[in-house]
Amino acid sequence: MKRRWKTFTYPPCEYGLQSEKIREIIMSTIFEKIISGEIQADILYQDEICIVIRDIEPQAPVHFLVIPKKVIPRIGDALQEDQSSLGHLLLTAGKIAEQENLSSGYRVVINHGKNGGETVPHLHVHVLGGRQMRWPPG
Ligand code: 5GP
C-alpha cells in the first residue's frame, strides 16, 4: 500500500511565533558571545554588571551599546531585582558619553520588541552622538 505523508500546515501566527523563538535562540547568543569573549568587539568599558561596545553598524559618528551581563531579553522583561542594574546601565551610558566627548549632546535609546525596532533580544542601551539628532525618530 502506498504510504501517504501528512503535510503539516501551520497557521501563520503559530509559524510566526515559532520563527520568532528560533530567532531569539540564535540572536541571543551574539551579545552573550561578546560578553564571554568568544566574539570580538570594540570594548570601551566593562565591569561586573555591564559591558560597553561600539555598535558594529554605527548610526551616528559615535554609537555604542551598554549591555547588562545578565541576560534580560528586553526592558519589559526586567524584574524588580534588576532595578539597580538598570540604573547602573544609564549611569554608565552617561559616563562613557562624557569619555567619548559628547558634551554637545547625545541620544539614549532602548528598542523593545518588533515595533520598537529591536533586533537582538538581549537588553542594550544605545547611545548615539556626534551629529544633530532629529525628532520624532523614525
Ligand atoms: P537593536 O536593533 O536590537 O536595538 O540593536 C541591536 C544593535 O546591535 C544594532 O545596532 C546592531 O548594529 C548591533 N549589533 C548586532 N550584532 C552586533 C555584533 O556582532 N557586534 C556589535 N558590536 N554590534 C552588533
Image: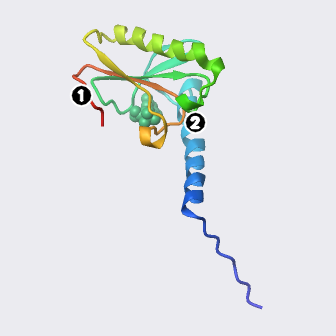
Q: Tag 2 or tag 1, which sits nearer the N-term?
A: 2
Q: What residue would you read off at disc 1?
A: 134
Q: Residue at x 53, y 36 (%)?
A: 121
Q: Is residue 116 left or right of residue 50?
A: left
Q: Which mark is residue 29?
A: 2
- Is 33 located above or below residue 23 in the figure? above
Q: Which mark is residue 47?
A: none
- Nearest the eye: 138 or 30: 138
Assign the C terminus to one quadrant of the image. Answer: top left
Q: Is residue 98 left or right of residue 37?
A: left
Q: Estimate how packed mark 1 is, as few (under 14), some (14 to 19) or many (20 or more) residues with alpha carbons within 10 Å.
A: few
Which residue, as the protein is rendered here, is positioned at the far bottom? 1
Which residue, as the protein is rendered here, is positioned at the far left? 132
Give the image location of residue 78, x and y in percent.
Answer: 59, 26
Give the image location of residue 55, x and y in percent.
Answer: 39, 28
The answer to whether residue 49 of the structure is visible from this angle is: no
Assign the N terminus to one quadrant of the image. Answer: bottom right
Q: Secondary structure at mark 1?
A: loop
- Nearest the eye: 35 or 121: 121
